[in-house]
Image (cartoon, coloured by chain):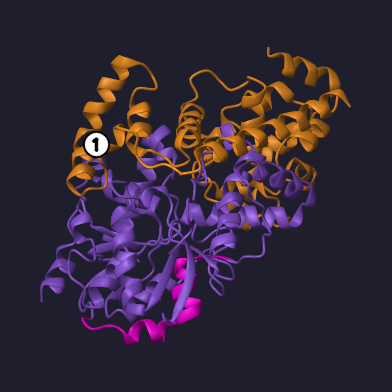
Chain colours: A purple, B orange
Amino acid sequence: MATKEYSFYPGCSSQKGASSSNYLISVNSMCEELDIKLNHIPDWNCCSASIGYASGGELPRMALSARNIALSEEHNPGQEIVATCAACWLATRETSERLSENSDLMAETNEALAMAGLKLKNETPIKHMVEVLIEDFGYDAIGAKVKKPLEGIKIAGYVGCQTNRPFGIEGESFENPKYLDKLVETLGAEPIDNYDKKVQCCGGALAFSEPEKSQAMIKDIIEAAYDGGAEMIVTPCPVCQMNVEVYQDQINAKYGTKFNMPVTYYSTLMSVAYGRSAKDSALDGQIIRATRLEEIAAK
Amino acid sequence: MSELNIAMVEKYRNSFLHEVEANVEEGDWVKMCMQCGVCSGSCPLGSHWEHSPQKLFMMIRAGKREEVLSSDSMWMCTSCYNCVVRCPREVPITHIMHGLASYAKRLGLVPKGQQTAKFAQHFWDNLVKKGRVNELKLGLNLYFMNGFAEGVKTSLKMKDIGLGMLKTKRMSPMEIFGGHKVKDLDGFQAMVKKAQEIETARIEKNMNA
C-alpha cells in the first residue's frame, strides 16, 4: 500500500498533447519515488480557470468545480483532493469555501448537479500538490529521497500568484513565501537571494488577450532572475511556466534582451534529484532546454 | 441598449449600489471599501486601468452606472489576488471585478472589441462543448478572433511558439479531430444549462421584485 493516497484532479492542461503534459509526467515520477498514489477523479471536467467568469457567471462556474468534488466524494470517498494546477486548485477550493458559506448557492448548485445525477456533500479538503509535499511530507522526508543532489545550480524560485494568493501555503507570507527556496535547497541546489519578482503576476490568461502588457511583466520576472545569478527558474504553476518560458524570443525581439532561461516545475527538479531519467522527468518537454538538469540526469 | 439593461435602469433608478449588491457576484461587499487605495497600488496592470478598483467602488456609490459598466477597467483583472490579500477590510476585490465584468456582459455593455471579453467567451464556449478545454482549437480561435487578416498575422507571429509546443508534445494536431472530453457530456451540459437558467431567473426576479 502506498504511503499516501489522494483523489487527483489533473486538469485540462495536463492531458496528453496539452501545454503542461510535461508537468504531469514529472509529477507521476516524483509521486512514484515518494510512494504517493494518485487516484484520478473519474470523468473530471474543466474548472473554467480564472477566465471563465466572464461568460460563465457565478453559479455555472461553481457547478463546474462542484461536479468534480461530487465525483471525487462518490468514487474516491474519504480521500483529500489534490490538484497540480494552480488555477484548478484555486477554483475548486474557492467553490468549496463559497458553497460552505452560502446555503442558497449550495442548494442551487445541487439543483444543477442533479441534472448530472450527482450530489455534493462538500466535506472534502482541497489541496495543492505543494501542500502535500510540504505539509504531509515535509522537507526532511523530501530530502531523504535525493539520490543526485542538484549541486551548483542556481535557481530562482518563482512562486507567482495563484499558488500563493488568496490561500497560499500554511505558515508562508503572501509577500515573501520561502517554500520554493527551501525546496530548492533541500534538493541540493542553490536558491538565489532576494528574488524580488517571486510573486509578480505574469499576466495569467491575459497573456493571450493583452500580450504586450503581460510580456512587460514577464520580462521583469526573467530579468530579476538573471540579476540574482540564476541559471534557471522553477515554478509550481502551469500558466506561470508557460508564460515565462515560451515568450522569451518575442521579448528578446521587442526589448533587445538575450533571454534564454529554462523554466521548470518543482516536480522536474525533484524527479531529476530522485535519480529518474531525463524522459521520466520530462526534460524533453522543455522548449528552452534545462541543460544543467540533463547533465545530472545523464550521470 | 439591451432590454434587461433598460429594465435594470428603471428598477434601480438612483441606487446603482443596490443594483450591484443584488446582481453582482460578491457585490454586497462594495460598501465595505474604505477608499484606502491599497488595491490600486497593488494591481499588476494598475497603470492600464482607466478606473482603479478603489475608484470603481466610489463610482458605484456615486451612481455612475454607465461609466462603471461600460468601463474597460475590470477587464484588466489578471486574477492575481494581490488586492484581495492586501485589502485591510478583506473585500474580495478580484471576485467583484469578475462579477462586474460578467454583469456588464449580461447587460450588453462591454466595450466593443474588448480583447479579454472575447477571449473569455471563446474559452467558455470551448470548455462547455466537451467539458474540457481543447487548447489547440482555443489557440486557433484566439488567433482569428479579430478577423482573418489579423489571424494570419498573429499565426505567423506565433509560429515559432507553436512549433516549440509541437516539438515538445505540449500541443497535438490530433486535437483538431475532437480531442479530450468528459464521458458524461450530456449530464455535464445539462448541469451547466440548469445553472445558467437558475442564475438568469434569479437576476430577472430581482428586476421584477
Q: Which of A234 and B57 is in front in this view?
A: A234
In the image, the segment drawn in magenta is A126-148
At horizontal 40% and vertical 75% (from top left) the residue drawn is A36
At horizontal 19% and vertical 61% (from top left) the residue drawn is A290
Where on the picture, by quarter, is residue B24?
A: top right
Which secondary structure dominates the residues rendered in magenta? helix
- Percent across and percent down for residue B2 are 68, 14
- Percent across and percent down for residue B194 are 66, 35
Q: Is residue A128 left or right of residue B205?
A: left
Disc 1: which chain?
B
Element marked by disc 1: helix
Q: In this view, does A109 lie to the left or right of A248?
A: right
Amino acid type assigned to the residue bearing label 1 in the image:
Pro
At horizontal 44% and vertical 45% (from top left) the residue drawn is A204
At horizontal 84% and vertical 24% (from top left) the residue drawn is B12
Which quadrant does the N terminus of chain A fall into? bottom left
- Percent across and percent down for residue B60 are 75, 32
